[in-house]
Amino acid sequence: MGQLLQQLINGVSLGSIYALIALGYTMVYGIINLINFAHGDIYMVGAYVGFALTTFAGLGFLPSLLISMVVCSILGMVVEKVAYKPIRNSTRIAALITAISVSLFLQYTMMYFVTPDTRTFPEVVTNKKLTFLDGSIILDMKNIYIVAITILLMIGLQYIVHRTKIGKAMRAVSLDKEAAELMGINVDKVISYTFAIGSALAGAAGVLVGVYYNTINPLMGTGPGLKAFVAAVLGGIGIIPGAVFGGFFLGMIETMVSAYGGSVFKDAVAFTILIIVLLVKPNGLLGKTTREKV
């Protein structure tokens, strides 16, 4: 029982990171129906910004986290303006190829400047551990930080989406972009804000991953980025609660498989579950079936 609870705690921590990255995927898809495969690499940039601020600038964890979020939000807006805006009305395959190209560009540009070597993230969070049930459950302070920050960011996102003017505009553009334009909403501005918010969450996830695993490298965005996309699809792509649910679900599944079935098979199990879910519910676990007029 103790081992099961321990793995659930580890799964919640990992799922928090997946959920933050998945939110960026689902927000962008919900607004412009684009799968931004460069999103995982923005998360990688966030990890390196956090590493530079903590290692060379000597900043603490929270200032580094906030600055990384700001830098990644700016990067997200630049990527949208330079790469995605010119092809917004092009075919979906053109947008997909562009997203993959941007992903590779970010990976190898970062590799050029920082070298491919794996870097060790400094200990910026206390490694104090709390034990329960006679030591069978160990709660690391890193886990508490990760889950607490994730919950705060998700609450903040929900507030922005449901309680602010820009959030109302996002929901309007997501529902009907043409009608939103006719009502005077600046769609370009809304899309930029969407990329900024999603990229900021990815930047936060990058710093949290550095704190959690203590290592970063220029190709670190590929695996978690793909898994976060799986999480978004599992929950229902374009649905914010679905991305959160999918992230936590995937994190706990991976942790359980690693603990009881072998870490070699965790990725296979994750994608197998995705296939099964899509066969049963093509719109995801929390997605709704929509009819399209032709």
Image (spheres, rainbow, N blue to C red):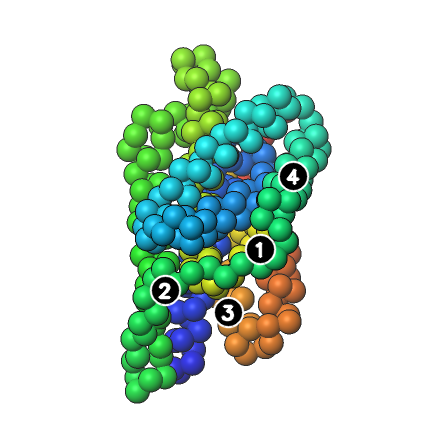
Sequence-first tag of 4 and 2: 4
Point 32% across, 66% down: residue: 126
Q: CA distance from mark 4 to mark 2?
A: 32 Å
Point 29% across, 75% down: residue: 130
Which residue is label 4 attached to? 105
Which residue is label 1 attached to? 217
Which residue is label 3 attached to? 255
Placement of 120 over or under 35, stated as above or below: below
Point 41% across, 17% down: residue: 185
Label 1 or label 3, whichever lies nearer to me, is 1
Q: CA distance from mark 3 to mark 4?
A: 31 Å
Given the image, on which type of amino acid does mark 1 rest? Answer: Asn
Given the image, on which type of amino acid does mark 2 rest? Answer: Lys
| Label 3 Cα crowd, 10 Å radius (few <14 / some 14-19 / many 20+) | many
Given the image, on which type of amino acid does mark 3 rest? Answer: Thr
- Which label belongs to residue 142? 2
Q: CA distance from mark 3 to mark 2?
A: 17 Å
Label 3 or label 2, whichever lies nearer to me, is 2
Label 3 or label 4, whichever lies nearer to me, is 4
Sequence-first tag of 3 and 4: 4
Is 289 or 226 nearer to us in this picture? 226
User: Are the residues tagged 3 and 4 within 8 Å (C-beta)?
Assistant: no
Label 2 or label 1, whichever lies nearer to me, is 1
Given the image, on which type of amino acid does mark 4 rest? Answer: Phe
